Image (cartoon, rainbow, N blue to C red):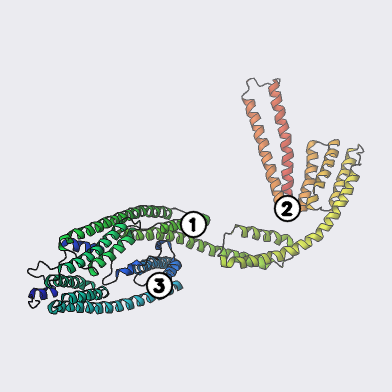
Amino acid sequence: MLEHKNDNLHELADGQKPESNSNAVVPTDKEKALDSITASNAEEGEDLASFEDTNIPTVNYEKLDLEKLNKELHKLIKHHKVTAIKDHVEEIKKEFYRKYNDLIEEKKDAFFEENPDANESDFQYILPIKNEFDHNYEEYRVAKNSYFKQLQNNLNTNLEKRLAIIEKLKQLIDNSENNSDALKQLGDLRDEWKNAGPIPKDKYNHVWNNYHFHVERFYDQLHLDRESRDLDFKYNLEQKQKLIARAEELLDNKDVIKSFRELQTLHRIWKEEIGPVDREIREQIWDQFSEITKQMHDKRELLFEQLRSVEKENLALKVAIISEIDVLSKQKISNHNQWQKEIAKVEELRQRFFSIGKVPAENTEELWDLFKLATRNFNSNKNSYYKELKKEQQENYAKKLALIQKAQELKDSEDYAKVTPIMKKIQDDWKLIGHVPRKYSDQLWADFKEACNSYFDRFHAIKNKESEVEIDAYNRKKEYLDLLKGFQLSGDHKTDLGEIKNHINNWKSIGSVPANKRFIEGKFNKILDVLFDKLSLSKRETEAVKFNNRLESILETNDKRKLQSEAIFIQRKIEEINSGVIQLENNLAYIQNATDENPFVKEVKKNIEKYKDELKIWEDKLNQIRELNAEN
């Protein structure tokens, strides 16, 4: 019954198409197209079930810094299958090295800006997290290689099993005489085939076609009874209808990616685990399954299109951020506080850049290059500013060292009249000098403070002793002021003037009073003003005596600045009076018939004389100061 052999069968087993065999199961174009869709996400020879690890959370790796990327890599290796984390690991690796290389470039730029004469070999920067990451990635790579080596061995072993099953199937067809027994053996071979496991992808279509060809040949050439064959076809139909029903349920699942992966598994079961159905409905049932697959593919494409739309929006957002950084990189900034504000802005923009999701793959590298360029330009300007600032701070450091040295040379001096103004100027100069490098700041201030305190503590100790004398002088002047309030003029001009001068000399002989008690000098001067007003002296003589008293008070304070200010004030008064006289004289020139009898002329001439009298008084005062300066 089975003695006849068709050479074409052996040709098909070797991968060649038979010349004519209506029963041969050769995949249609639809099946091939659908196979390419459902197999598009599978690794070569890898079981589709390996894609079903849905416990891996979705993470935007662009947001993570180097430390967090390393932790994510370590977590994936420890908690997930090596086949399930491939895409995640490669994305983490890409982000890690992108950010690491960017960091190294920044450090290198800063290094050569600070060390312009350095060579490339002089730059060294060690980042411990880089070694950790390389160690973790090597652990993943070894595990992956080990897995795929074992997988390849398993695939080859499974290929041998499936080829052996096909040979058994051939022998069953060629040698069986008992249809019932042959049908049972076919069922056993199907079970073996079902459990044989995956094989190399490049062998898959050939082996699968060969197997199904011989299954069809079994039915066609063994002349099974119609009832057994129909039961088997019916069972296969029921199983395929269940797959179709499940595929329809997957269409309603919101998780399109997960549903698509499960549909891949349904295709594998359809092809590998379920036998043929009646030829009359074979095309129809396949079309049902194909239509569902196409709908699922359309949903997947729609999802990807939506994701691509989001990626384009992300691209626009990131480009806008790069533009903002570019604008900031071109600003002219000349102070530290403003730079700190701009640095904070750029850092905030960087964080926003990394917080935005993925962009289209074709734009990733160009976008990253633009981002690095903008940030590098900003950092270059920033580094240039701080390089100049550092140079300025070094100059300030040298200036402050010089002031400290000068203060230390003077701190033990006892020539307080000469050294105190110098020490005060040193303190004023210190305040005018800008910042120094932070590492020197505290020590510089400590040395400067010690030198100044050493001098002024001694100076103030002596001043405190002097202040006791001044307080005593104040108390004595207070008593003398009470005595002077009772002084009465005798009426004799010469005698009274002598007495007033005697009181002035007595007052001065008492000595200086504390600065916060010098108001008593004002009270004394008011009494003198009253006494001078009672004397029959001219205004010029009175002002001369008063001013002489004022000059002596200034000399007691040893305040040369005050004396200089007094001279400047008098000169300005002289200038004002001269201007007033000139103005009045000019006014007379404009008057027609300016006779002495004219009331207006009389008034103007009177004012001119008044100004000239005042001028003499101020000129006398200026001469007194000049004579005083000449004596000194």
Residue at mark 3: 77
Residue annotated with mark 1:
344
**Which of the two discs, 1 and 2, labels the residue nearer the N terminus?**
1
**Which residue is at 69% across, 49% downward?**
564
The residue to which callout 2 is attached is 559
Which of 72 and 208 lies nearest the eye of the viewer? 208
**Closer to the N terminus: mark 3 or mark 1?**
3
Number of other residues with Cα within 10 Å of mark 2, as a class: few under 14, some 14 to 19, many 20 or more: few
**Where is 290 relative to 179, above or below?**
above
Tags 2 and 3 in contact by the CB under 8 Å rule? no
What's the distance in space between the residues labelled 1 and 2, CA to CA?
52 Å
Q: Classify 531 as above or below 338.
A: above
What residue lies at 37% left-to-right and 72% top-to-bottom?
A: 81
Q: Label 3's element?
A: helix
**Image side of residue 285 versus residue 595, left or right:** left
Q: Amino acid at mark 3?
A: Ile
Q: At which x and y percent is residue 304?
A: 31, 56
Q: Work out how far the residue at label 3 is from the one at label 1, CA to CA, in angstroms.
A: 36 Å
Q: Earlier in the sequence, mark 2 or mark 3?
A: 3
Q: Is residue 39 visible?
A: no
- Report the quarter where the C terminus lies: bottom right
Q: Which mark is residue 68?
A: none
Judge left or right: residue 614 versus residue 65: right
Q: Nearer the viewer, residue 612 or 384?
A: 384
Res. 497 visible in picture: yes
Residue sitting at x 84%, y 44%: 524
Question: Left or right of 156: which side holds 442?
Answer: right
Q: 38 or 422, which lies in front?
A: 38
Image quadrant where one finds the N terminus: bottom left
Eye-nearest disc, 1 or 2: 1
Residue type at the position of mark 1 = Ala
